[in-house]
Image (spheres, rainbow, N blue to C red):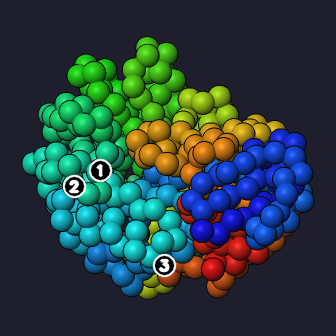
């Protein structure tokens, strides 16, 4: 069993502390702990947080290994400071059976870079017609608790109601990709001034908000738990705020890109900015930041969506939707939330680790940094400034909207149950 002494780290951004890791566990937190033969990691000026947890990652395996695999995706996650990711179900085959979710879960365990918690499909083949084997996936070795047809909306209200009722049996949650299909037929970008000027088919905010309004009412009606994926509009924030004020079991996530980027970028016609839901307006971005700060939005989720260059380096209308995000999420959150004074580092630990772990019912992650807790940790340098260079990504794909942009912060080390997956800023 190896022991590691992280010396002088600001735990959750507070006063410098020494943290001793013994095997898989935090053995002690204190001042001037003796090294006693432990490997010493000097952490002067660095911030120590619990390992990050992503509720929304597309790992693409099985079926689209040309864009990402469980191995490359979990290496990207570790590089970004994550110790657990939820792998979305829209693979080929779809993760709608116990067999597929167990396969994905075992691949993650085997590689050892980051825990992979599979998300199960709500409906067979993501087709929206017949409920998938939710109970069998929950009972499988993967112990699925989050169910989503992400990429597609569960738009049939009866199917959504049945799914919400079904997951209560095992304390599961339905994560909804809120997109009314008829209102978004052929939609290419946010509906507004810019879409009007560019002549591109718009994607109205109401297409997202109407589904969220329906689903919080459904969840309240059946007494179940609903999670809203990638909130992107100010109106969506208002609905979630109202649902929470009623005491309903509603949670929500926001992506890093919706905290920073706006539809003005679409004027470039660069498909790297094409994403689902679309980039919205400055007013939406500011409302999302405020909601993440006040807790209306529970957590940050990356919606890491890798695509091979041939699916992105083409004309806007033909390009795939989505952006990679695991390796830049913490920097974007520092830039938009910490450096703006909206959130402190304890708040970042809450929104990027503790709360997503609770929503996903993921044991052993998102825990306090304290004696006896699992040593899932990330050590970051908040003073670092660097230009994003996708050539250095661990992900198999390069479709980042931040290429050439200066962002703050750098992950210096990541520990998964005491094992360093990243050390000195490099994957081990
Ligand atoms: Zn989605």
Proximity of marks 2 and 3: CB atoms separated by less than 8 Å: no
| Marked residue nearer the N-terminal end (2 or 3) | 3
Q: Quadrant of ligand 1?
A: bottom left
Tell me the residue that label 3 is attached to.
Answer: 72
Q: CA distance from mark 1 to mark 3?
A: 22 Å
Depth order, front residue of 62/15: 15
Tell me the residue that label 2 is attached to.
Answer: 140
Q: Tag on residue 144?
A: 1
Q: Position of residue 359 (x, y in %)?
A: 44, 39
Quadrant position of the N terminus in the picture: bottom right
Q: CA distance from mark 2 to mark 3?
A: 25 Å
Residue in view at x 18 percent, y 65 percent: 99
Residue in view at x 30 percent, y 34 percent: 171
Counting other residues with Cα less than 10 Å from the Cα at mark 3, is it few (<14), some (14-19), or many (20 or more)? many
Question: What is the quadrant of residue 413 in the picture?
Answer: bottom right
Counting other residues with Cα less than 10 Å from the Cα at mark 2, is it few (<14), some (14-19), or many (20 or more)? some
Depth order, front residue of 350/279: 350
Q: CA distance from mark 2 to mark 1?
A: 7 Å
Q: Tag on residue 192?
A: none
Proximity of marks 2 and 1: CB atoms separated by less than 8 Å: yes
| Marked residue nearer the N-terminal end (1 or 3) | 3
Q: Position of residue 332 (x, y in %)?
A: 69, 56
Q: Position of residue 396 (x, y in %)?
A: 50, 81
Left or right of 418, for residue 35:
right
Q: How many marks?
A: 3
Element type at marker 2?
Answer: loop
Element type at marker 1?
Answer: loop
Depth order, front residue of 49/92: 49
Left or right of 316, for residue 16:
right
> Where is 216 relative to 412, above or below?
above
């Amino acid at each position: 069993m190896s022991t590691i002494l992280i010396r002088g780290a600001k735990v959750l951004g507070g006063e410098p502390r020494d943290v001793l890791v013994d095997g898989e566990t935090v053995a002690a937190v204190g001042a001037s702990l003796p090294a006693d033969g432990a490997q010493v990691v000097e952490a002067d000026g660095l911030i120590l947080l619990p390992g990050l947890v992503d509720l929304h990652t597309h790992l693409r395996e099985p079926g689209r290994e040309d864009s990402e695999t469980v191995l490359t995706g979990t290496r990207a996650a570790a590089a970004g400071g994550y110790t657990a990711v939820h792998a979305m179900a829209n693979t080929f085959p779809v993760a709608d059976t116990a067999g597929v979710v167990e396969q994905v879960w075992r691949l993650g365990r085997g590689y050892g870079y980051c825990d992979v918690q599979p998300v199960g499909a709500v409906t067979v083949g993501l087709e929206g017609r017949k409920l998938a084997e939710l109970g069998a996936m929950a009972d499988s070795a993967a112990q699925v608790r989050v169910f989503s047809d992400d990429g597609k909306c569960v738009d049939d209200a009866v199917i959504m109601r049945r799914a919400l009722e079904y997951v209560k049996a095992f304390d599961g949650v339905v994560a909804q990709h809120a997109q009314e299909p008829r209102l978004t037929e052929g939609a290419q970008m946010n509906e507004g001034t810019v879409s009007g000027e560019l002549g591109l088919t718009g994607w109205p905010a109401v297409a997202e908000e109407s589904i969220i309004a329906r689903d919080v009412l459904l969840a309240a009606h059946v007494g179940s738990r609903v999670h809203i994926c990638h909130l992107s509009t100010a109106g969506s924030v208002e609905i979630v705020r109202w649902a929470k004020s009623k005491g309903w079991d509603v949670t929500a996530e926001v992506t890093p890109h919706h905290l920073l980027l706006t539809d003005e970028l679409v004027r470039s016609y660069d498909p790297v900015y094409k994403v689902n839901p679309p980039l919205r307006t400055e007013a939406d971005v500011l409302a999302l930041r405020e909601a993440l700060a006040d807790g209306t939005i529970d957590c940050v989720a990356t919606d890491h969506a890798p695509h091979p260059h041939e699916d992105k380096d083409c004309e806007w209308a033909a390009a795939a939707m989505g952006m990679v995000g695991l390796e830049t999420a913490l920097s974007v959150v520092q830039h938009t939330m910490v450096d703006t004074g909206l959130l402190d580092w304890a708040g970042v630990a809450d929104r990027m680790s503790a709360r997503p772990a609770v929503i996903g019912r993921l044991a052993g992650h998102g825990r306090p940094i304290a004696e006896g807790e699992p040593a899932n940790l990330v050590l970051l340098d908040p003073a670092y400034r660097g230009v994003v260079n996708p050539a250095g990504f661990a992900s198999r794909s390069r479709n980042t909207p931040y290429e050439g942009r200066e962002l703050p912060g750098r992950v210096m080390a990541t520990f998964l149950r005491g094992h360093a997956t990243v050390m000195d800023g490099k994957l081990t």
